[in-house]
Image (tube, rainbow, N blue to C red):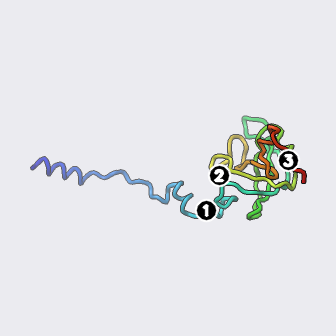
């Protein structure tokens, strides 16, 4: 009986380390504060259509030295202007100003990727045709 009393005493004394309050967790905040609709240019969706305003070259961060080809686009749904990376060699030639492009995230949930500062999105389609299909010469861009 004495051993049982001792065990109960130890159990009462033990207190686990205090956990982070749920609101302090980044994932919880992202899901529950509603900022994904306000702050995210896509408004919570995975892809978004936009109109190309201009083609831009963004200099890579140190220690790399390159000009990454990007476009500035204005989203159709809310009018926000964003910079989007154009992947693959020579694909910027398929994109003209005032083209409609489909834009997706860049794979890091709203962070810039690699050595391209401030670019959080990439171009997936141009005028309804996949950029990869144009690059591999499977399809041609429709004449408009």
Picture coordinates of residue 95, whole percent (x, y): 85, 48
Image coordinates of residue 92 in percent, x first then y, are 83, 44
Query: Which residue occupies 76% across, 40% down?
Result: 60
Image point (16%, 49%), residue name: 6
Residue 15: percent from left, percent from top: 30, 52
Along the horizontal axis of the image, is 25 left or right of 75?
Answer: left
- Nearest to the observer: residue 64 or residue 112: 112
User: In the image, 72: left or right of 144?
Assistant: left
Q: Which mark is residue 78?
A: none
Which badge, 2 or 3, comes first in the chain's sequence? 2
Q: Secondary structure at mark 2?
A: loop
Residue 110's disc number: 2
Do the numbered discs 2 and 3 sit on residues whose CB atoms are within 8 Å?
no
Pointer 1 or 2: first along the chain: 1
Q: CA distance from mark 1 to mark 2?
A: 12 Å
Q: Which residue is mark 1?
A: 35
Please tell me which residue is depicted at 64% across the width and 63% down the height of the picture: 37
Which part of the image, by quadrant, shows the C terminus? bottom right
The quarter of the displayed image where residue 61 is located: top right
Q: Nearer the viewer, mark 2 or mark 3?
A: 3
What residue did someone put label 3 on? 141
């Amino acid at each position: 009986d004495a051993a049982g009393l001792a065990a109960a005493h130890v159990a009462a004394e033990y207190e686990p380390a205090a956990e982070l309050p749920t609101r302090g967790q980044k994932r919880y905040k992202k899901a529950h504060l509603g900022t994904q609709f306000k702050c995210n240019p896509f408004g919570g969706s995975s892809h978004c259509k936009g109109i190309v305003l201009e083609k831009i070259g963004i200099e890579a961060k140190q220690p790399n030295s390159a000009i990454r080809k990007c476009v500035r686009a204005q989203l159709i749904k809310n009018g926000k202007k964003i910079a989007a990376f154009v992947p693959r060699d020579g694909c910027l030639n398929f994109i003209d100003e005032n083209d409609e492009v489909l834009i997706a995230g860049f794979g890091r949930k709203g962070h810039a990727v690699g050595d391209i500062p401030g670019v959080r999105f990439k171009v997936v389609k141009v005028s309804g045709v996949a950029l990869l299909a144009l690059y591999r010469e499977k399809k041609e861009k429709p004449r408009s």
